[in-house]
Structures are given as structure tokens and as C-alpha cells.
Image (spheres, helix red, strand yellow):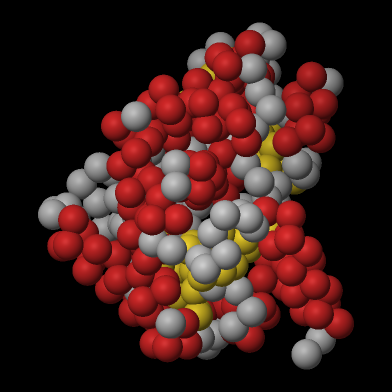
Amino acid sequence: MTTVLRRFIFALSLAALLVAPKDNVRAEQFRVALSTKDFGYLPLFVGMRAGLFAQENLEIQWIVVNSNVVVTALMAGEIDVAGIAGSSMRAAARGAPLKANFFPYDKSLFVLMGAPNIKRVQDLKGKVIGTTGPGATTEVAASMVLQHHGMDPKKDVTFMTVGGAETSIVAMRNGIIQARAFNPDAAVLLKKQGFTELGVLADMGPWPWAGYSTSDAHLANRRDKIKRWTRAMVKSLQFMLARKEETYKIAQADFTHSRDVIEGAANICIRAIDAQNPGGATDDAMRKNIDLTITQPLKLPTSPALAQLVDFSLLREIHKELGIPGRR
């Protein structure tokens, strides 16, 4: 076992001491790794605070960990699921025994925000758009908005790597870049400060988002445990759709924003949920996602088969049990 992995396990054990409920000592521990704590993971926190995991006799232990470490920990069986479907699918494309198994959102949560002097998407022609890196999801999201408005991302704009949200906001204020895709809470905050909302990806085409992954070994040997987590996550999405006010309150308890920012960001999340296929994605949407985020960036000659990267078998079982139509 590597030193990095030992540190990860120690941190996860420490997190368990901090978050473990004292009144449910019999609940089975379920370890979840996240790449960051943001609105993309809201359904997980809704499920915890609404008691949906407790109904499945699961005690969620979550921790924020670097995606490279998470892939190793997933394969070692040290965690049950990880909110890093993209990284896991890239590893699976190279032969790693991992599968994406749950996508809370049918569409991206990103919002393309422009500097105050940019009033419409067409104003970006000849301008610079910030990204977190070449081919990153921030670049793909911006490209989708541009294409939606009849522009050519390869000819009409220039993309520049500027880093995280805070750095990008400074760059926009200083005129270095004129737009960037942000998470919903950051986008709502920027809009309040006079920046321009240019495109909400949740109002555009399907793009499976904020996905989770697990190992082939877990799917084979701990199938019931993964199924109970998946069932609670499906119910969490249904909770968000049916009980918005309670969802706002839960979000406010976990994210330190004002009520109007919480409500605006949560509404974007809710709009991105597919009520007919909660947690899933169509084959066409998954193929497009894989082509944009895996095949093209990795310069693969052909896209890997869906079965090599994704396993929705448990999700489909749950949809059937709950009477949810699902989509293929």
C-alpha cells in the first residue's frame, strides 16, 4: 500500500469519527470520495440530511480527495463510490476495472458568465474565454453555448487557461478574459455583482454530469451495498424535484451562501435532473460525453464501448422497482 493511500485511509477514518451518527451504530459504513464540495454534489447532502441513506441502513462517510488518489483507492476497495466519473472513465478507457454507475444530472450545471460589458453571446466574437485547461469541461461547456448561438468555438474565440474560479473572476475584472463557465452558486453570485449570464447549460442539450463511479469488484461482490446507496440517491433526486423548499434549507445548511444565491443555484440543479431517468443517461448522451471528454482529449482512434466505461444495471433494477420509466 502506498504512502499516499495510507494517508487517504487515515483521513477517511478521521472523517468517520467527525461525521458518524451516534444514534445508529449498526448502520453499515459507506465511503464516498469527492473531488470538491460544491453544488454538483447537492443530492448526496440532501440524501444524508433527509435520512434517505439511513433508511437503507447506510452511514455515509465523505471526504474530499485528489482524483488521482481516488482512482487508486477505488481499485484497492478502500472506498465504495467516488464522485469522479470522468477520471474513472478515462482510467477505464485504459483498462482499469472501474465503471461510472450514477449521474445525478442529465445536463451540465455550468453557467457561462460574461464580463459586465459583454451583453450577449455574439459579443464574444474575437474575445478570450477562460478555462481550467485545454479540453476541460469548462471549455466544452463554453463551446456548447457558442454553438447553440451559431458561433464556431474554433474560429470565433480564443480559449485561455486561467485556473480556478477565483483566479478567473479576477481575470474577467481585469479584462484578461471576457467569459468563463462557472458552477451555479458562483454564477449566481457573479450575476448579483453585475456580470452577464450568457448561457445556462441546464437549459440546453443532455450532458451527463457530476457522475459517480465504483469498481468492478464492488459491483460483483458488494452489489447489495451499492444498490442501497443507488436507491437512496434516486430518492434524493426525487426529493429535490418534489420538495424544493426543504432542498433549499438543506443546501443552506451545507453551503454558506445567502438565501437568494442558494435558491438560484439549487434551481439550476433541479432543472438539470431528468425525472424520467433519475441517475441515468441515454446511450446517445453517454457516447457524446465520452467522445468530448475522453476520446478526443486522449486522442483515441475510436471511442471505447459503453460497457467498458459505464454500468447502469443496478440503477435500472431500482427504476423498475420504483416504477420509474427510465430511458435507454
Question: Which one is nearer the viewer's eye here, 304 or 255?
Answer: 255
Q: Is any atom of residue 132 visible in this view?
A: yes
Figure check: 22 above or below 111: below
Name the image quarter holding residue 150.
Answer: top left
In the rendered image, residue 59, in percent from the top left (x then y), is placed at 54, 61
Snapshot quadrant of residue 310:
bottom left
Is residue 17 toward the left or the right of residue 265 in the image?
right
In the image, taking residue 236 as reference, residue 113 lies left or right, namely: right
Q: Which residue is rendered at x = 56% and y = 23% of the image?
A: 262
Q: Is residue 316 left or right of residue 20?
A: left
Where does residue 227 sit, x and y in percent of width and height?
A: 35, 70
Quarter holding the C terminus is: bottom left
Nearest to the observer: residue 112 or residue 134: 112
Determine if residue 81 is in view. Answer: no
Q: Nearer the viewer, residue 321 or 157?
A: 321
Placement of the N terminus among the 4 image quadrants: bottom right
Q: Is residue 288 above or below residue 120?
A: below
Q: How many marks?
A: 0
Q: Residue at x 44, y 69 (%)?
A: 100
- Residue nearest the observer in this picture, 61 or 285: 61
Q: Residue at x 64, y 79 (%)?
A: 78
**Given the current orientation, which residue lies at the most extreme right position?**
3
Q: Is residue 296 above or below residue 112?
A: below
**Which residue corresponds to the image point at 62% horizontal and 42% vertical from the top-left?**
38
Q: Residue 11, percent across and down?
A: 79, 66
